[in-house]
């Protein structure tokens, strides 16, 4: 019987430390997808998980906190379901990254659109992290 890994999103996978967030924005690399701006950096510290993520939805675009929280929940859920692809790559390459996902779409996107965009983020992170590791 095969072992099925649980799809969870634990506290140690969230980017919470202010110093790490500042490092991401000061020294990070940026790329854009259809819905998101992603700022990421290969971590200089040892992290409890292969990747740590923070999600941001600007108040300028969505005044109501209910709307911002809805979008953040959808992004975290899509990441939770697809993060195993990123984790497998990072573990095999022995890389740890921290990144911030900033929502930049003008309207509230439905879940399927967000899920596709998160898949695109994960693919680009794998490619970019491999490229950065080779240059280092």
Image (spheres, grey):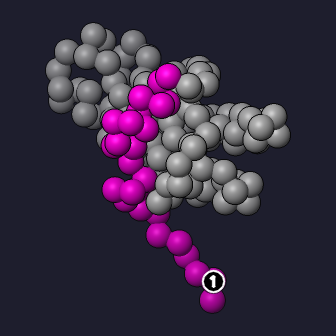
- In the rendering, at what x and y percent does residue 88 appear? 66, 59
Percent from the top left, x then y, of residue 14? 38, 48
Give the residue at x 47% y 60%: 48
Q: Foreground: 89 or 117?
A: 89
Q: SS class of the residue under badge 1?
A: loop
Whether residue 36 is visible, yes or no, is no
- Please state which of residues 117 and 93 is positioned toward the viewer in this rendering: 93
Which residue shows up at 77% across the image and 37% down it? Answer: 136
Q: Quadrant of the N terminus?
A: bottom right
Task: Indicate whether residue 20 is drawn in magenta.
Answer: yes
- Residue at the outermost right position: 134
Q: Which residue is drawn at 53% across and 72% down?
A: 5
93 is higher (above) or lower (below) than 136: below
19 to the left or right of 3: left
Residue range (magenta) = 1-26
Q: Which of 47 and 6 is in front in this view?
A: 47
Residue neighbourhood size for the residue with mark 1, other residues' Cα within 10 Å, grouped as few (<14), some (14–19), many (≥20): few
Seen in the picture, residue 108 relative to 21 is either above or below; the reply is above
Residue drawn where x is 69% and y is 57% of the image: 94
Residue at the limit of the structure toward the bottom, as seen here: 1
* Residue 102 occupies quadrant: top left
Q: Can you tell which quarter of the image residue 64 is in?
A: top left
Residue 87 picture location, percent across and down: 61, 56
Q: Quadrant of residue 12?
A: bottom left
Q: Is residue 134 left or right of residue 77?
A: right
Front residue of 13 and 70:
13
Determine which residue is flagged by label 1: 2
Answer whether residue 29 is visible to the viewer in this image.
Answer: yes
| Image x and y of residue 37, in percent | 51, 22
User: Left or right: 31 with respect to 135?
Assistant: left
């Amino acid at each position: 019987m095969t072992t099925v890994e649980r799809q969870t999103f634990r506290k140690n996978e969230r980017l919470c430390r202010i110093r790490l967030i500042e490092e991401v924005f000061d020294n990070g690399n940026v790329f854009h997808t259809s819905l998101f701006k992603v700022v990421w950096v290969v971590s200089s510290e040892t992290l409890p998980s292969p990747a740590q993520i923070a999600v941001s939805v600007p108040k300028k675009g969505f005044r109501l906190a209910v709307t911002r929280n809805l979008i953040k929940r959808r992004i975290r859920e899509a990441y939770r379901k697809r993060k195993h692809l990123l984790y497998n790559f990072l573990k095999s390459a022995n890389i740890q990254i921290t990144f911030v996902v900033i929502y930049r779409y003008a309207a509230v996107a439905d879940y399927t659109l967000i899920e596709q965009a998160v898949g695109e983020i994960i693919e680009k992170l794998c490619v970019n992290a491999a490229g950065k590791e080779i240059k280092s």
